Image: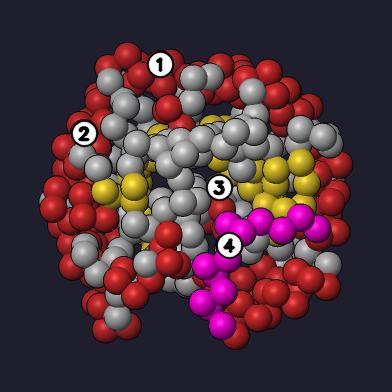
Amino acid sequence: MGVISEGKNLSRLTNPGPDEELRSVLEGKAFEDYKSPLFIAWQLNAECNLGCLHCCEEAGHSMPDEMSKEQALDFCRQIVELDIPYVAISGGEPMLCPHIFDVCEYIRSNDISLKIETNGEFIDDEVARRFADLKMRSVQISLDGATSGAHEQLRLAGDWEKAVEACKRLIGYGVNTEIVFVPTKFNIHEIGDIIDLAYSLGVYGFYTGKMMRIGRAAKNWDILCSTEEEYAKFFETLQAKTKEYEGKMKIYHYPYDVVEELKYRLECPSASLLVIPNGKVKLIGPLPFLCGDLTKSSLQEVWEDYQKAWRHPDVIDFTNKVVADPKLLCESNNWIEI
């Protein structure tokens, strides 16, 4: 996925955190005030069956040092011990991870809110039933078009019909199902139709916003990025559809881009951690900095290192350079340990 949304990316960029009631309680608190994170965004694996032009992680090949099943479950144990309320699991494509249900069952058996973000192509009846039994917060399906042509032009090797069928199966089993849509030159004109489709399918929520300039999206920026005029029409349609479906379907859209987000996060970092498949922790999706390694340090220690890292001179300097020159976002996956 390549858009700032409530899951994988307000999932990876901001603190997607809790519901509105809890947000009001937390208002005004700084991330230093928390003894542990409020949210974990966990890229469970790097393997993926698609070759999406806008992939933030440039997924497609397994990392040789990805966390083992035992390491992943130990990480789950630490999440439980620190009483972290919310975890969102993505990839790569998380359904290709052989121990995904071991992880999901551990998290849900300890009553932690869980979201899965997937392209939907591996969700058959058995998977949908297992997700229903877990009573998760939601499953989010990437659907980048109201038509197969738009979706598959962006998601190379993708299958629009499989993604749509995944939504139908999940909803049929009573799973809270969401759709996330990334606007590009290929599909931005379909925003009204894709929202109508989402409602017709019976999804719980629809997420969208400006495309994130990270990973492949940054490298393909010139062929993907919509014009300001296209975005203006896009947000106008979103506002109209939000009113149309008020009380019927949740429509969430984040109006800011990555650069605007980074300006804010430099002053107000989120109380969240972004864990990549090998157990290392990124400071935030658009920046290349790694601030910890869960295969060598405890989650508590990594959280403390994360808090310190945001005040590191190299982080502040590079972030300011990115704000001045967004082309540097191409370096987001060229990791730097601090």
Circle 4 residue = 332
Mark 3 neighbour density, 10 Å: few (under 14) some (14–19) many (20 or more): few
Query: Residue 333 lies in magenta, yes or no?
Result: yes
Quadrant (top left, top right, bottom left, bottom right) of the C terminus = bottom right
Query: The residue tagged with tag 2: helix, strand or loop?
Result: helix
Q: Are marks 1 and 3 in contact (CB under 8 Å)?
A: no
Circle 1 residue = 130
Tell me which residue sits at (64%, 33%) in the image. 65
Question: Which marked residue is nearer to the observer: mark 2 or mark 1?
Answer: 2
Q: Amino acid at mark 4?
A: Ser
The Cα atoms of the two marked residues, 3 and 4, are separated by: 29 Å
Residue 18 seen from this side: yes
Sequence-first tag of 3 and 4: 3
Query: Residue 75 lies in magenta, yes or no?
Result: no
The Cα atoms of the two marked residues, 2 and 4, are separated by: 31 Å
x, y percentage for residue 59?
46, 45
Specify whether 236 is left or right of 111.
left
